[in-house]
Image: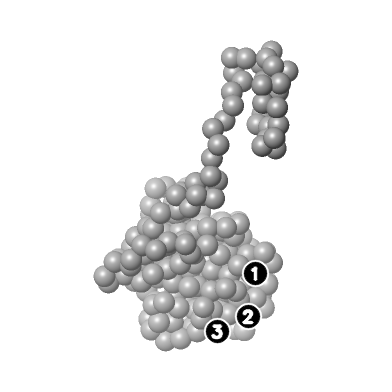
Amino acid sequence: MRAFFEGSANIPWLLDRLAEFRPDLREEATVDWAQAARDAWPPLAVGKRFYLVPPWSEAPTPDGRLRLEIEPGMACGTGRHPATQLCLEAIERYLQPGSRVVDVGTGSGILARAAALLGAGSVIGCDIDPEAVEIARGTLGVTVFIGSAAALGGQAADLILANIDAAALEQIRDELARVRKPHSIMILSGFPEDDIPPGFAARQVLSKDGWACLIC
């Protein structure tokens, strides 16, 4: 148990009252939690092109890399997870400039933003979590709405991104097939190597630290 008190609390009296819990009882050192949180999110190079930074970072962007700013908040997608990194690496390889991109389950909008940085013609992101959509709407060059792939028109995407779990991908498999253009590409991740969703014809499987990414 951790207990927090006002700075004016009588610490000696509190410690005396809780003496029966010694020697496991201890007083924590004062921590600047805001600074500690910032220290926990240093810049990170991902793939060959991206340089992930939090909004407060003043670190210069290395030559040849694109600065991908992402808020490490409540929405999924900070760029630290292997599944997200696999998607970013796949986007580098397969996105063609001018492509129409759809990001299903956009979370923080990190993949949508990456696609925009690489020259996508248009990017649409969707998520069923309203809080995630509110965060992702701050992503420049990306249209985001609350909902799923069912709200999108048929044959709308040259490239589909979906970094969600295997069960969710199984549920929306038919919708993804409807939304994609003929000869389009899907980049699917968010699941371990031993839980690859069935029903997707992958021409390549990327893997990292036990996580998989299908290129369909």
For label 3, the residue is 156
Binning the other alpha carbons within 10 Å of mark 1 as few (below 14), some (14 to 19) or many (20 upward) gives some
Direction from residue 130 to residue 210 in the image, left or right: left
Q: Name the residue: 59% across, 18% down.
A: 24
The kind of residue tagged 3 is Ala
Q: In which quarter of the image is the N terminus?
A: top right
Residue farthest left in this picture: 63
Distance (Cα) linking label 3 and label 2: 7 Å
Q: Are marks 3 and 2 in contact (CB under 8 Å)?
A: yes
Amino acid, disc 1: Glu
Helix, strand or loop status at disc 1: helix
Identify the residue under disc 2.
152
Sequence-first disc among 3 and 1: 1
* Residue toward you, 16 or 212: 16
- Image-based side of 76 in relation to 68, left or right: right
Relative vertical location of residue 19 with respect to residue 26 in this rendering, above or below: above
Mark 3 to mark 1 CA distance (whole Å):
23 Å
Ranked by sequence position, the earlier of labels 2 and 1 is: 1
Relative to 104, does residue 86 appear above or below in the rendering?
above
Q: Where is residue 154 in the image (x, y as percent from the top left)?
A: 60, 83
